[in-house]
Image (cartoon, rainbow, N blue to C red):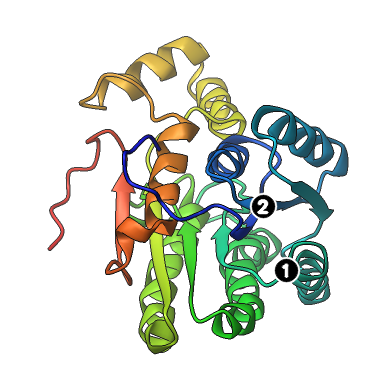
Amino acid sequence: METGMDPGLKNKVALVTGGSMGIGKATAMALAQQGAQVAVCARGLDALKAAAREIMDVTGSQVISIRADMTSAEDVKMLVFSTVQALGEIDILVNNAVNSTSGRASELSDEVWLNHIQTKIMGYIRCAREVVPSMRSKGGGRIINIGGMGARSASATNPGSGVTNSGISNFTKALADDVAADGILVNCIHPGSTRTQRQMGLIEERANREGVTSAEIMKRTVANIPIGRMVEPEDIANLVVFLASNQASAITGQTIGVDGGAGRGVYY
């Protein structure tokens, strides 16, 4: 985020889940560029370590990598404890981890549904619950939940995304109201079609399902985005930086879509 105003993020401690690639990696990079010390976590350790090294090389900020699985309450406790031990009490949490599987709404198994819920809804809840004491001890903090526009548009072939992201929006508001008096601000971002490895995989899955090329699916996707391009991970990262900054000190309990104008709903 380029601005003439100081965002106030220098030496802040940030924890970014799902930080090895895509939106998480771009977010960790953007926060580190503002001088924050960053902990990134994911399940795949090799990719995670590579991302941390790259961010440190580019920004010069301290970045640590911690393997953690959001479906494990013990992993989440360890993640937050290790971050505090290495960097200090946490100022910023960016909940971004996701592990979704597409499939027909009428056919998804319990196992698939529970994996969606355990990774995203419960993973976000666990991380938030663990960092709140850190933020209270520092007199405030920011929690930013990365959801998805599936919350606002049901899909017969990817229902898990809609269910979990809708839940994240509701949890965001509930938590925001709960911790506002502690100086902790909580917001949610719903990315639209974003050029990430996961999104490219979904496009390929859809192409195979429909018997067309990935290029054709990409063309159709972009045709429905008024700005004429897919959202980039950096577009999401820029909003995260703003919401974590001094300039967003009165914004809490909000869900903000970053979809290039693709959404057709009007929300008041």
Q: Quadrant of the N terminus?
A: top left
The residue under label 1 is 88
Residue 255 picture quarter: bottom left
Note whether 108 is above or below 124 in the view shown: above
The residue under label 2 is 37
Question: Residue 218, image x and y in percent?
Answer: 42, 18
184 vs 7, nearest the viewer: 7
* Circle 2 Cα neighbour tier, 10 Å, few/some/many (<14 / 14–19 / ≥20): many
* Circle 1 Cα neighbour tier, 10 Å, few/some/many (<14 / 14–19 / ≥20): some
Residue 118 picture quarter: bottom right
Note whether 50 is above or below 177 in the view shown: above
240 vs 87, nearest the viewer: 87
Note whether 155 is above or below 71 in the view shown: above
Identified by mark 1, the residue type is Gly
Residue 150 seen: no
**Residue at the spot 52% in from the left edge and 43% down from the top edge:** 34
Q: Tell me the SS state at disc 1.
A: loop
Is mark 1 in CB contact (under 8 Å) with mark 2? yes
**Residue at the spot 50% in from the left edge and 11% down from the top edge:** 213
**Residue at the spot 55% in from the left edge and 46% down from the top edge:** 31
